[in-house]
Image (cartoon, helix red, strand yellow):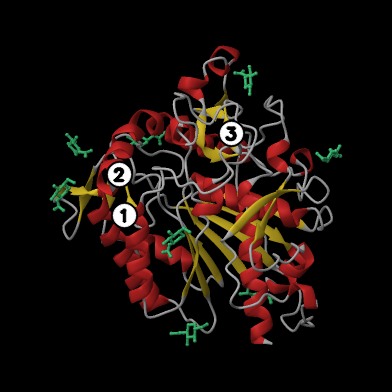
Amino acid sequence: MKTQSAARIQSLFPVLLASLLVLGTAQLVFDSLKSGRSYVFQFYGKPEKQRKSVFVLPEDRMDDSCNLFEGQWVWDNVSYPLYKENSCPYLVKQTTCLKNGRPDSFYQNWRWQPNACKLPRFDPLKLLDILRDKRLMFIGDSVQRAQFESMVCLVQSVIPKGKKSFQRIPPRKIFKAKEYNASIEYYWAPFIVESNSDHATNHTVLKRLVNLDSISKHGKSWEGVDVLVFESYVWWMYRPQINATYGSVDNVEEYNITTAYRIALETWANWLESNINPHLQKVFFMSMSPTHLWSWEWKPGSNENCFNESYPIQGSYWGTGSNLAIMDIIHDILQELKINVTFLNITQLSEYRKDAHTTVFGERRGRLLTKEQRADPKNFADCIHWCLPGVPDTWNEILFAYLLQSYQNFL
Ligand SMILES: *[C@@H]1O[C@H](CO)[C@@H](O)[C@H](O)[C@H]1NC(C)=O
Ligand SMILES: *[C@@H]1O[C@H](CO)[C@@H](O)[C@H](O)[C@H]1NC(C)=O
Ligand SMILES: *[C@@H]1O[C@H](CO)[C@@H](O)[C@H](O)[C@H]1NC(C)=O
Ligand SMILES: *[C@@H]1O[C@H](CO)[C@@H](O)[C@H](O)[C@H]1NC(C)=O
Ligand SMILES: *[C@@H]1O[C@H](CO)[C@@H](O)[C@H](O)[C@H]1NC(C)=O
Ligand SMILES: *[C@@H]1O[C@H](CO)[C@@H](O)[C@H](O)[C@H]1NC(C)=O
Ligand SMILES: *[C@@H]1O[C@H](CO)[C@@H](O)[C@H](O)[C@H]1NC(C)=O
Ligand SMILES: *[C@@H]1O[C@H](CO)[C@@H](O)[C@H](O)[C@H]1NC(C)=O
């Protein structure tokens, strides 16, 4: 059963993914063009700074035993969204669904409510205090880039003009809060390990080739980063096999996806074990971001996708887009790791959100869809990426909860 659905997804992904990943790619090209010349600024000021402590309220204390990933979405149009689409200048066009013409905004008004406790309220000033003199880096593909953008939007409004900056230095994007000497960064690495898709602005989508045992070039940019948040999934799910090298870069072979994914994560795990200082650095791994490509999975008998869905799925649901074999591999690798990596298992909570994808209110190949394309959601709806504000904000609320918790345990 498991294998069968895995086979089906892998055979259905290609058409849709090819175009959507091109879309993600084009976005990066576009972003870097827009930025023109990147610059690096320097910090002035004394290293000896008054270190303020983060004030943790009793209601922010999270019960260690509370599972934040089991719960439900509750309607909350009073507190949500946590920021407004048009108040965050750093959002790329791909995620600004309302501006792009989406008629309903219900998808912005849901709060994730864990069964056993409450998520602490997202407090941008607290996060900045936690990140004082630190770097937080998101590493992965375009889904991860949205989580990065969400995090920037969640904090940027509390920082006055002139005290923040945003740079694009491919494959990185860097947001800085100057007074805190804190940075929130993104690093493009769709397979985590190295591949021929690593150039942020000029890479192949169709002829992908992964170097399963190579990570050190990327790793150089990750060294010493205080909080690392990794993610990699959708780029693997293109065909049941993938071209890859192991050992010699001239020896290209086709690997089963699951085999290749496991080897890649082992390479990553080895890098962590020899480069991370667990006393100074924290590492997170995001589980797969689900897709909603086939409406028959939640609405038997239908033959559409996530387009025109306005409400979350009620009751239990797990789509075939979230590959259980990949989940098992992640589980095994994290079990064997000699350092602690916090696994943020956001797949299930995001599975309910068939309503929250960009659908036809996003981009393809760096351009907003045309009127004609919009009228053809069967071929043009994007059911992989998410609108912002939206689901990635919740992932960040959970990340914040963990950072807050480890901070308070540390005090
Ligand atoms: C919030 O939701 C409630 C219940 O659906 C509705 O009655 C109310 O008008 C909404 N408020 C706003 C500001 O949208
Ligand atoms: C600023 O933060 C960086 C890490 O992001 C750190 O290496 C540096 O020492 C900090 N500078 C000061 C003046 O504290
Ligand atoms: C993109 O990469 C290809 C292959 O590496 C190269 O031939 C081409 O010149 C590059 N294009 C640009 C605009 O850099
Ligand atoms: C691997 O590369 C070869 C040669 O470019 C190509 O014919 C084949 O389709 C590729 N396999 C996969 C799984 O992409
Ligand atoms: C690759 O997958 C196919 C089909 O799922 C399976 O029959 C085969 O044994 C796998 N090969 C390896 C080397 O795991
Ligand atoms: C969206 O769904 C509603 C019913 O839920 C239907 O009335 C409407 O025509 C649909 N819109 C489009 C553009 O398909
Ligand atoms: C993540 O959560 C899902 C559903 O809640 C569960 O089936 C899966 O085993 C979890 N993964 C890991 C690695 O714990
Ligand atoms: C990992 O974290 C757990 C609980 O937070 C702790 O008990 C354990 O000692 C840590 N292990 C390592 C290798 O740091």
Horizontal side of 177 relative to 327 (left or right) equals right
Q: Residue 325 bears which disc, if any?
A: 1
Q: Is residue 266 visible?
A: yes
| Residue at figure coordinates x 34%, y 61% from the top left | 328
Tally of numbered discs: 3
Return the residue nearer the eye: 59 or 167: 59
Mark closer to the observer (3, 1): 1
Q: Secondary structure at mark 3?
A: strand
For marks 2 and 3, give the CA distance.
24 Å
Residue type at mark 1: give it.
Ala
Return the residue nearer the eye: 381 or 115: 115
Disc 2: residue Cβ within 8 A of ligand 5's nearest atom: no
Disc 1: residue Cβ within 8 A of ligand 5's nearest atom: no
Residue type at mark 2: give it.
Ala
**Residue 300, quarter of the rendered image:** top left
First-in-chain label (3 vs 1): 1
Mark closer to the observer (2, 3): 2
Q: Secondary structure at mark 2?
A: helix
Outermost residue on the bottom side: it is: 411
Kindly check if marks 2 and 1 are in contact, taking CB atoms under 8 A apart as contact. yes
* Residue for badge 3: 358
* Residue for badge 2: 6
| Residue at figure coordinates x 26%, y 57% from the top left | 212
Task: Bin the neighbour count of mark 2 within 10 Å (Cα to Cα): few under 14, some 14-19, many 20 and up.
Answer: many
